[in-house]
Image (cartoon, grey):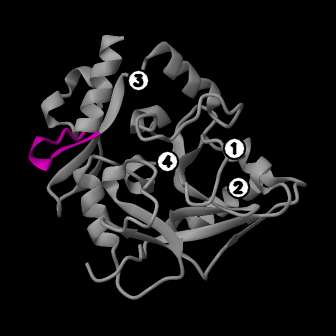
Amino acid sequence: MTGTTLTDRAILRISGEEAQAFLQGLLTRDVLTLTPGAPRWTALLTPQGKALFDFILWGDGDDVLIDCEAAQADALAKRLSLYRLRRKVTIARDEGLAAHWSPDAPHRPFDPRLPALGHRWIAPAGDGDATAAFRTHRLSLGIFEGADELGQDHILWLETNAQELGGVDYDKGCYIGQENTARMHYRGKVNRRLVAVPLAEADEKRQRAALPELGLSIELRRVDDIDPATLPGWLAQAIAAQAAE
């Protein structure tokens, strides 16, 4: 790998005296306790609790930086603007910053979803592109992101394995989609999971994305139909723990 910049990501800056309070009522993670150097993976959901946009939050003083898909950045900014109403909040791209990744950069924060993903940080863009390397590494760990893999308004947030990857806080108060998300959690009823299977074993009815270059099919399968031996360790342990409850 010759660079660290994730060129498929963009940075939105949410600023203004009500920036944190504004996001607090919308997103699945607690924004009010966000601190520099400790990013959080979160999402904006539908009222039914389905994923619309997933992204990583970074604290920057009173501002919040959103590390999101570049292809979805404008759509995300537009959707957030619908909820702004009269709040004193500014939503804009920060063209001077970029997301970075390295598998080995111990002075940088871990990716908030799973330490095995490596290290992630925000800085001005540099030479070289780590996008393909990060994507391959991420998918090898069975971790999905973005509109192509999670869909938009198709999959319930907890079905994306969001709880296991730190993508939801249950004690932060209300947010869009909170009711169904909390109900699924407290009833222990996450009956389907987003998983990667070999493309040769793909089930088109369950398939959400085909990745022929990696020989994988991303599918939403019933937990009862998943062979635990095919799962990454972090997910197999979580499903086993749920079954034991």
Give how far apart the Cα atoms at labels 3 and 2 are. 28 Å
Numbered disc 2: secondary structure:
helix
Residue that mark 4 sits on: 152
Q: Quadrant of residue 172?
A: top right
The answer to whether residue 16 is above or below residue 52 is below
Q: Earlier in the sequence, mark 3 or mark 2?
A: 2
Closer to viewer: mark 1 or mark 2: 1
Residue lying farthest to the front in this orientation: 107
Look at the image and give the residue range highlighted in magenta. 195-205
Query: Is any atom of residue 156 visible in this view?
Result: no
Q: Amino acid at mark 2?
A: Leu
Residue that mark 2 sits on: 80
Residue 152 percent coordinates (x, y): 49, 48
Residue lying farthest to the top in this orientation: 245
**Disc 4 and disc 2 in contact, CB within 8 angstroms:** no
Residue at the location (31% across, 12% down)?
Answer: 244
Residue that mark 3 sits on: 190
Q: Earlier in the sequence, mark 4 or mark 1?
A: 1
Q: Quadrant of the C terminus?
A: top left
Q: Amino acid at mark 3?
A: Val
Q: Residues within 10 Å of mark 4 (few under 14, many from 20)?
A: some
**Disc 1 and disc 3 in contact, CB within 8 angstroms:** no
Q: Amino acid at mark 1?
A: Leu
**Disc 1 and disc 2 in contact, CB within 8 angstroms:** yes
Residue that mark 1 sits on: 26
196 part of magenta stretch: yes
